[in-house]
Structures are given as C-alpha cells and as structure tokens.
Image (cartoon, rainbow, N blue to C red):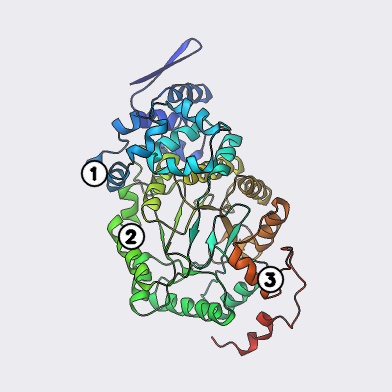
Amino acid sequence: MYHQTLGRKSYSFPDLKTLLAKATPDRSGDHLAGVAAENAAERVAAQLCLAEVPLQRFLEEPLIPYEIDEVTRLIFDTFDQSAFGPVSHLNVGEFRNWLLSDERTSAELADLAPGLMPEMVAAVSKIMRNQDLITVARKCQVITKFRNTIGLPGRLSARLQPNHPTDDLKGVAASILDGLLYGCGDAVIGINPVTDDHRVLSDLLKMIDDLRQRFEIPAQSCVLGHVTTQLEALRQGAPVDLVFQSIAGTEATNRSFGINLRMLEEAREAALALNRGTLGQNVMYFETGQGSALSADAHHGLDQQTCEARAYAVARHFKPLLVNTVVGFIGPEYLFDGKQITRAGLEDHFCGKLLGLPMGCDVCYTNHAEADQDDMDNLLTLLGVAGCTYFMGVPGADDIMLSYQSTSFHDIRYLRSVLKLRPAPEFEEWLVKMGITGEDGELTRIDFHNPLIRSLPEFTF
C-alpha cells in the first residue's frame, strides 16, 4: 500500500500499478480503462508518492505476474544488475534529477540503458515536464546500421511511406520517386500493403529492390505485412531487407497480434541469414502505440503509457534498425486531442531512447480526433528538438490507404532546414551524386535530365 497526504486529504494506492496509473498525465484511454486519477488533486498526490518510490521497488513488485506473461519474464530475465548500479540507490524523483543533471553524458546514458526496466522509465516520465522529456531524450544517442547509418548526431532520417489503396506498382513507384526527390527514404522505403498476401509482398519488394539496385540507393526496404507473411515471402525468394511487426507490452496483446517472442526470434534469424546489410545487421523494424493493449482488453489493469514502455523491452531484445510509435493512429478513445497526442509522443520518444532504442515517431492523428495539422507541426518540431531519429514521409501528409494524417516529404525538408539537420551520411552522398541536393544540403531544381526521371520510361513493372 502506498500513501500520500496532500493538504488535509490522504490518498492511498493499493499497489504499484495503481500508483503508476493514477500518476499518469490525463488521457482518454486511461479513463476508458477505469484506471485514471479521479481528478487533478489525486494525480498530483500520486505523482508526489511515486517520486518517493525506490527504483529497487520495481524489481520486487512485478506489474504483471512473472508466471503468466512472457514479456514480464523477458524484462526480469534480461535485466542487467551491473548496468543498474549507478542509479540503484535512487528513488524515482532522485532519478529524474540525476537524468537532468548537466553532468550526464550520452555515453553514461547508453551504458545505463540495459540496467533500466521499462517500468522505471515509465515512472520517471510521469513526473517530468515536457521540456524535461526533451532535454534527456536529446542526450540519448542510439546508432544502428543496415545499408546506411541511422541516428548519428546532427542527422534526421525519414521513412518514405508510399502506400497505395490497391498496391498498384506504378502508383507506389511514383510516390517513391516523389519522396526521393525530397531527400526522403534513408530510414526505410516502407510500404503498408492492402493485401496481406506473400505474393503481393514479393512483387512490392522486388520492385523496390530493382529501383534500389538500378540507382545504387544506399537504403533499405520493408513491406509491412504480418511477420508470418513476410517469412513466407522470404522463403519464396523475395528480397527481404527488414522484417516488420507491430508489438505490444503484454503477452496477451501480442497474442492478439498473432505473434510471440519465439516467432520474432525466428524472423530475426531468417533475416540475418540473408546477410543483405552492407554496413550492419540490424534487421528488425517495430511499430508500437499507446492504447493497443487496452484495445485488445489485455492491459492487466496497467495504464496505457506503462504498457507502451514495456513494448520497448520487447523491441530492445531484438536489436532493431528502427522503432516508432504511431502515436495518434488508434484514435481519440485513447488520446483525445492534440495536447494528449503531443504529451504521449514526447513520453514515448523519451522512454524508447532512454531504454536504448533507435526511436522514431509517426506524428499523426485520425480525422475524428480533436487535433489538426498545427498540432502535428508542434509535435514534429518538439520531437525534432528532442533528437528523434526519424519521421514518416507521406505524400501530402495524407495516407490514402490507411486514411489518417501524418507528416509529408515537405515536413521532413522543413525540419532539416530549421534545425540544420542532414540525412544519413551515405544517403546524403547519394543525393548529391544524383543531383537532388547540393553539397550544402539544399534541394536543387530538378529537370528532365535528372537520371531518376530520365530512366522512368524504360522501367518495367
């Protein structure tokens, strides 16, 4: 039992998961789950109480029993007690101060990551202001490699997301060309297919790989079907670079996705066996999002942000090239408006980076949420300042297949320009070689003599 007095009123919280939920900044999903604080006073009391909880307590009180949840077992079995040493004597509030100290370095935070449980990181995020989340996340540097190098200081990558409502190869190729001409695609050229059929995935993968080889593009591709469909395409000889899967922070939620940890390990081993990376072998790509466990009725009474942080333990175990939170995609039932989406995006990025992940964000919302593109501009800029690894590049910021609003090729250009950021170095060199950008990183005027455009009539689909 945890207790806190605020003014003349005393508050009691029966266990750690209740305390974490009550301390969470307000969001619609926690109200839907019945775990949110009843009012601002109870939330403040919970936050004050949480600040006094020793970090060691998280090792003693699993939020979901070890015996019934393989994600809990993964978290405890892979916990690095030695790495935890520098902060093992701190409580949650002292840990916040430790992270915010000017003395903390990127190297220290990288060394600490294996010694942090996701619940610890979720806890400290709940007592931090937005600027605190930005300050600490900006210090975290996570570098991954496949055909280029993602996450270097002063760099910002982009997933080129050329989705099409009928998986039409020409339509997808046109969007890829558009994105490349805006300098997008260094994170991944990644397509969400309409049809989860291994033959469709194979056709899309072959088309991207033909483009990549013809123009010697130092980038990686992915078609975001279910992991089992991707494995079948791989077995049939498709040129699979990265293996994708949506993941969550509880075994039951992952089961609702049709996956488990053994399946993810099998997929990673199959992709590694292809040895397609030229600079590194980070072969996995994961997406997450607050609310997925609640929507599957598999949250075990946890708040949605703590469930989300637990998903990052799953991702970390498989050494991915990319992870991103699709922050506003599930809808206003979970994150009601622009304010809640913004807070969630900053929390997710902070938690992922502190746990050692190459964290990106799909800055997005659905059309029935109380949000608009101005809200997304704000979150995009805040995350750019926070050192977010990559964002989505969607034609016109409007995904015509998934029917949601994201960020555009122009938005990537905006952020690189105002924050003086550049693409992955190998990709930047290619952009200059192809005449898409100059040596100064600025976009050039493209005409019909550009080799990308000139060769399109010769390309067969």
Query: Alpha-carbon distance for marks 2 and 3?
Result: 37 Å
Q: Nearer the viewer, mark 2 or mark 3?
A: 3
Residue 334 appears in the picture as rendered? no
Asked if labels 2 and 1 touch by Cβ distance under 8 angstroms, the answer is: no
Counting from the top left corner in percent of width and height, residue 331 is at 52, 49
Q: Nearer the viewer, mark 1 or mark 2?
A: 2
- In the image, 433 versus 327, the foreground residue is 433
Which residue corresponds to mark 2?
264
* Residue 439 position (above or below residue 406): below
Q: Residue at x 43, y 25 (%)?
A: 50
Q: Residue at x 40, y 40 (%)?
A: 118
Q: Residue at x 31, y 33 (%)?
A: 59
* Residue 64 position (above or below residue 315): above
What amino acid is found at the position of numbered circle 2 in the picture?
Answer: Leu
Q: Nearer the viewer, mark 3 or mark 1?
A: 3
In terms of secondary structure, where does tag 2 sit? helix
Q: Label 1: how many residues lie within 10 Å, few (<14), some (14-19) or many (20+)?
A: few
In terms of secondary structure, where does tag 1 sit? helix
- In the image, 89 versus 162, the foreground residue is 89
Q: Residue furthest bottom?
A: 458
What amino acid is found at the position of numbered circle 1 in the picture?
Answer: Ile
Q: Is residue 228 left or right of residue 330?
A: left
Q: Residue at x 56, y 82 (%)?
A: 214
* Residue 416 position (above or below residue 43): below
Which residue corresponds to mark 1?
68
- The label on residue 432 is 3
What amino acid is found at the position of numbered circle 3 in the picture?
Answer: Val
Which mark sits nearer the N-terminus, 1 or 2? Answer: 1
- The label on residue 209 is none
- In the image, 247 versus 84, the foreground residue is 84
